[in-house]
């Protein structure tokens, strides 16, 4: 029955409220025990008698003082005393009883004034200064009040009336607070159970600040999950599409050989070349997909070691020099003489710059230039791959690192190159090194890819397992 968060919150508030009321009842009961109603009534009567004597002191004192005060003491059933300011007793209507010293002045109206006589008996009193400088004290023995009477006559009525109303209002308030906290969480639970449904709306943010933050984080998580699901669906669709074309070619030309349609040696050779090229294309795509899967899963090994960036970049230029000459493109490297040595995976960085330079050459026209420009500061190495090619459309730049995304058709006269996985792999490798890659491009003027790699790799800063 009380397994839900709302019920437990309500029970917690109820326990707190009952505890608070119990503490207040004990405190109030202790106050009543120290200052019961009979004490307060008696003190009020003593003050009234003292005030009456003080108001009629001229009339009373014209008579024999002792006689007038004794009659007043008998009439009001009190003991009347007169003291000098220094405390000397001048008159006492009950001189035969144990003596009472001048009682102290009471500064708080909440305290019942009491004084003990020489025999230890406790008296309630009222103290009043008179015009002649004497101090009038009106006293009576403190009455005995049984504790049961205090509880029955004073404490219980207040608890049943005021405490009952307070408890009822507090329970209603506690129920409202419990719902205020628990209802948003119930919304999160309901949304999480229906999450596979695409029409599920984000959870409304309300309730305490922490619950609103949880709801906001949940909505953001759901958005990321849906985005991931969309990416996975697109990924499967793209892989299927990319494999369908080469498989169709392979199947068609293989069928032609089997059917005898391609009987001539030239036809068979052409069919074999198509089968070989398309199978090679599928093989490269499968290797790229496996590479991405390892990078995503954190199972790809980074063999971290000091990397000579001058040697690395020069080797990339040398690798593409013949292609650049053939396409009449200037391929150059610009690196300072004294250059720091970052700790990284040299083979993976070579894969990054190979992919970037290959893309730059592909989209740069004859007479253009591709430059590898390197610089460093105290924390990182920065390598730019700059081309003077056709550039990237502005609306394509946010998507170029997405898998299977290709802006090539508009940049290369409609020719398709690869499956659109190269830049996705580049970004994963750079991220695995704790770095980042940015792009700046303008159509017709060229593109610049900038790779930032830390000089020193902190321990376990990436998802990848590293080998040193």
Image (tube, rainbow, N blue to C red):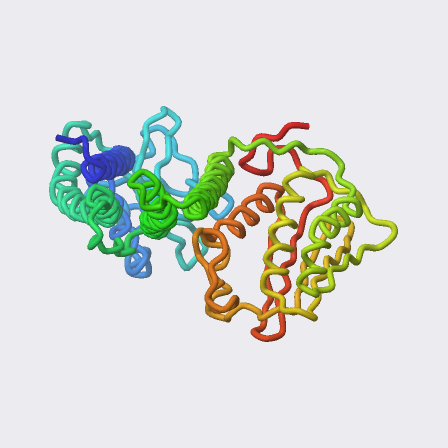
The residue lying toward the viewer, choosing from 159 and 11, is 11
451 over 31 or under it: above or below: below
Could you tell whether 197 is left or right of 244 in the image? left
- Quadrant of the snapshot with the N terminus: top left
User: Taking 205 as reference, is 108 left or right?
Assistant: right
Q: Position of residue 390 (x, y in %)?
A: 58, 71
Would residue 23 be found to the left or right of residue 415 on screen?
left
Q: How many labels does the image show?
A: 0
| Farthest front residue in view | 264
Could you tell me which residue is drawn at 59 percent across and 75 percent down? Answer: 444
Q: Picture coordinates of residue 161 (x, y %)?
A: 12, 44
Query: In the figure, residue 428 lies in which quadrant?
Result: top right
- The residue lying at 59 percent from left, 68 percent from top is 441
Displayed quadrant of residue 306: top right
Residue 138's place in the image compared with 120, above or below, is: below
Instruction: Tell me what residue is drawn at x 54 percent, y 68 percent.
Output: 392
Quadrant of the image occupied by residue 145: top left
Work out which residue is located at the far bottom of the displayed protein and give it: 444
Viewer-side residue, 63 vs 231: 231
Q: Residue furthest right?
A: 337
Q: Position of residue 437 (x, y in %)?
A: 60, 54
Quadrant in the picture for the C terminus: top right
Residue 45's spot in the image, x, y percent?
22, 48
Q: Can residue 36 be seen in this view?
A: no
Regarding residue 438, the answer to whether it shows in the image is yes
**334 or 381, nearer to the observer:** 334
Write the residue at 28% across / 52% down: 207
């Amino acid at each position: 029955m009380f397994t839900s968060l709302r019920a437990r919150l309500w029970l917690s508030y109820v326990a707190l409220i009952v505890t608070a009321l119990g503490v207040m009842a004990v405190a109030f009961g202790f106050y009543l025990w120290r200052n019961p109603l009979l004490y307060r009534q008696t003190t009020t009567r003593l003050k009234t008698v003292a005030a009456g004597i003080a108001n009629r002191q001229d009339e009373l004192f014209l008579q024999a003082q002792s006689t007038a005060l004794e009659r007043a003491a008998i009439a009001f059933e009190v003991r009347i005393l007169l003291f000098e300011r220094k405390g000397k007793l001048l008159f006492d209507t009950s001189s035969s009883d144990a003596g009472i010293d001048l009682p102290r002045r009471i500064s708080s109206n909440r305290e019942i004034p009491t004084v003990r006589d020489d025999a230890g008996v406790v008296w309630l009193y009222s103290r009043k200064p008179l015009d002649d400088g004497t101090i009038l004290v009106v006293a009576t023995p403190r009455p005995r009040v049984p504790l049961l009477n205090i509880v029955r006559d004073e404490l219980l009525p207040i608890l049943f009336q005021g405490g009952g109303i307070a408890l009822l209002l507090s329970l209603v308030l506690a129920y409202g607070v419990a719902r205020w906290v628990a209802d948003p969480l119930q919304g999160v639970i309901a949304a999480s159970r229906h999450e596979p449904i695409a029409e599920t709306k984000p959870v409304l943010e309300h309730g305490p600040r922490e619950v609103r933050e949880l709801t906001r984080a949940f909505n953001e998580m759901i958005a990321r999950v849906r985005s991931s699901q969309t990416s996975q669906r697109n990924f499967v669709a793209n892989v299927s599409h990319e494999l369908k074309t080469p498989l169709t070619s392979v199947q068609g030309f293989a069928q032609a050989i089997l059917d005898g349609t391609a009987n001539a040696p030239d036809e068979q050779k052409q069919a074999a070349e198509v089968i070989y090229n398309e199978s090679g294309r599928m093989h490269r795509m499968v290797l790229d997909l496996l590479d991405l899967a390892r990078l995503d899963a954190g199972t790809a090994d980074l063999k971290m070691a000091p990397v000579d960036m001058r040697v690395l970049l020069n080797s990339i230029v040398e690798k593409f020099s013949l292609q650049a000459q053939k396409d009449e493109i200037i391929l150059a490297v610009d690196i300072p003489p004294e250059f720091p040595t970052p700790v990284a995976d040299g083979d993976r960085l070579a894969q990054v710059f190979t992919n970037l330079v290959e893309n730059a050459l592909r989209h740069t026209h004859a007479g253009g230039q591709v430059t590898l420009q390197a610089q460093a500061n105290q924390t990182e190495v920065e390598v730019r791959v700059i081309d003077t090619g056709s550039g990237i459309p502005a609306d394509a730049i946010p998507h170029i690192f997405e898998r299977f995304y290709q802006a090539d058709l508009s940049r290369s006269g409609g020719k398709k190159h690869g499956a659109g996985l190269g830049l996705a792999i580049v970004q994963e490798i750079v991220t695995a090194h704790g770095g980042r890659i940015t792009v700046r491009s303008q159509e017709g003027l060229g593109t610049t890819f900038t790779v930032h790699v830390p000089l020193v790799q902190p321990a376990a800063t990436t998802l990848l397992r590293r080998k040193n």
